[in-house]
C-alpha cells in the first residue's frame, strides 16, 4: 500500500505523484524521445545523484541505440540551493560531434542546468536536448528550456524517486511534497 505521508527529520511530506503515474509519464516521454532520435546515435548524460532512478526506468523503455554517461554535480544544502554548482565527477567520454540528451531529476532555479549546458556545449556536441522528470517554472532564476518535461510542478520541495532531502528519501518509489 502507498504511504500517504512520510517524515524526514522534522519535515512531513504528503504523496504527490505515485509510482504508476510516474511510470505512465515515463512511457510517454520515451515515445517522444524515440521519435526525435530515429536513426541517430544518442549519448545520454545522466545527472547524479538525483536522476539515477529516472534514468534507469527511462532507458529501459527507450528502444534505440544509446550510450550512457554520468555527471555528478552538487549545489544544495537542505531545501535551498547555494547558487554554486560544484562538478564532483565529470563525464569521461568524448561527446564532440555527438547528439546528447541530458537527463535531470528536477529543474528548479535552472542554475545547475545552465552550468551543465555551458560545460557540455564547450565539448562541441552536434546537439544537446534536455529531459527532466520535474520542472518548477515558478522557481526559475535563469532562462532554461526543457525539451522533454515529465511533470510541471508548483514551488514546493519534493522528495522520493531519486530526489533527496540531505541524502534521505531517494529510495522512495513515489514522489512526496513538503506539507506547508
Ligand atoms: P537548480 O539548480 O535549482 O535548478 O536545482 C537543481 C538540483 O537541485 C536538482 O537536480 C536537484 O538535485 C536539486 N533540487 C532542486 N529542487 C529540489 C526539490 O524540490 N527536491 C529535491 N531536490 C531538489
Image (cartoon, rainbow, N blue to C red):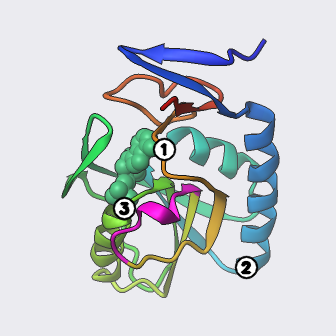
Instruction: Please name whichever residue, 64 or 18, is drawn nearer the observer in this view of the structure.
Output: 18
Whether pointer 2 and pointer 1 mark residues with C-beta atoms closer than 8 Å, the reply is no
Ligand 1 is within 8 Å of the C-beta of the residue at disc 3:
yes
Mark 3, Cα crowd under 10 Å, few <14 / some 14-19 / many 20+, is many
Q: Quadrant of the N terminus?
A: top right
Ligand 1 is within 8 Å of the C-beta of the residue at disc 1:
yes
Left or right: residue 134 versus residue 22 is: left
Question: Image height check: is 7 above or below 64?
Answer: above
Residue 109, disc: 3
Mark 1, Cα crowd under 10 Å, few <14 / some 14-19 / many 20+, is some
Please say whether residue 48 is visible from this viewpoint: no
Residue pointed to by mark 2: 36
Q: Disc 2 or disc 1, which is closer to the eye?
A: 1
Q: Disc 3 or disc 2, which is closer to the eye?
A: 3
Instruction: Please name whichever residue, 116 or 70, is drawn nearer the observer in this view of the structure.
Output: 116
Q: CA distance from mark 2 to mark 1?
A: 31 Å
Residue at the far front in the pictured view: 180
Q: Position of residue 45 (x, y in %)?
A: 46, 60
Question: Magenta stretch?
Answer: 133-142
Residue 156, disc: 1
Instruction: Please name whichever residue, 152 or 38, is drawn nearer the observer in this view of the structure.
Output: 152
Whether pointer 3 and pointer 2 mark residues with C-beta atoms closer than 8 Å, the reply is no
| Secondary structure of the residue carrying numbered label 2 | helix
Amino acid at each position: 500500500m502507498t504511504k500517504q505521508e512520510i517524515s524526514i527529520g522534522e519535515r512531513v511530506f504528503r504523496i504527490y505523484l505515485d509510482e504508476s503515474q510516474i511510470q505512465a509519464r515515463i512511457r510517454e516521454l520515451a515515445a517522444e524521445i524515440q521519435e526525435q532520435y530515429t536513426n541517430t546515435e544518442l549519448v545520454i548524460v545522466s545527472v547524479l545523484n538525483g536522476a539515477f532512478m529516472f534514468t534507469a526506468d527511462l532507458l529501459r523503455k527507450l528502444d534505440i541505440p544509446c550510450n550512457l554517461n554520468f555527471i555528478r554535480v552538487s549545489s544544495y544544502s537542505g531545501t535551498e540551493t547555494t547558487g554554486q554548482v560544484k562538478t564532483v565527477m565529470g563525464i569521461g567520454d568524448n561527446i564532440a560531434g555527438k547528439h546528447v540528451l541530458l537527463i535531470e531529476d528536477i529543474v528548479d532555479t535552472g542554475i545547475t542546468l545552465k552550468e551543465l549546458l555551458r560545460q557540455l556545449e564547450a565539448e562541441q556536441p552536434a546537439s544537446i536536448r534536455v529531459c527532466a522528470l520535474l520542472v518548477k517554472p515558478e522557481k526559475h532564476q535563469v532562462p532554461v528550456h526543457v525539451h522533454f518535461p515529465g511533470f510541471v510542478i508548483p514551488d514546493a520541495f519534493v522528495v522520493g524517486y531519486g530526489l533527496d532531502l540531505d541524502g534521505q528519501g531517494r529510495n522512495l518509489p513515489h514522489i512526496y511534497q513538503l506539507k506547508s
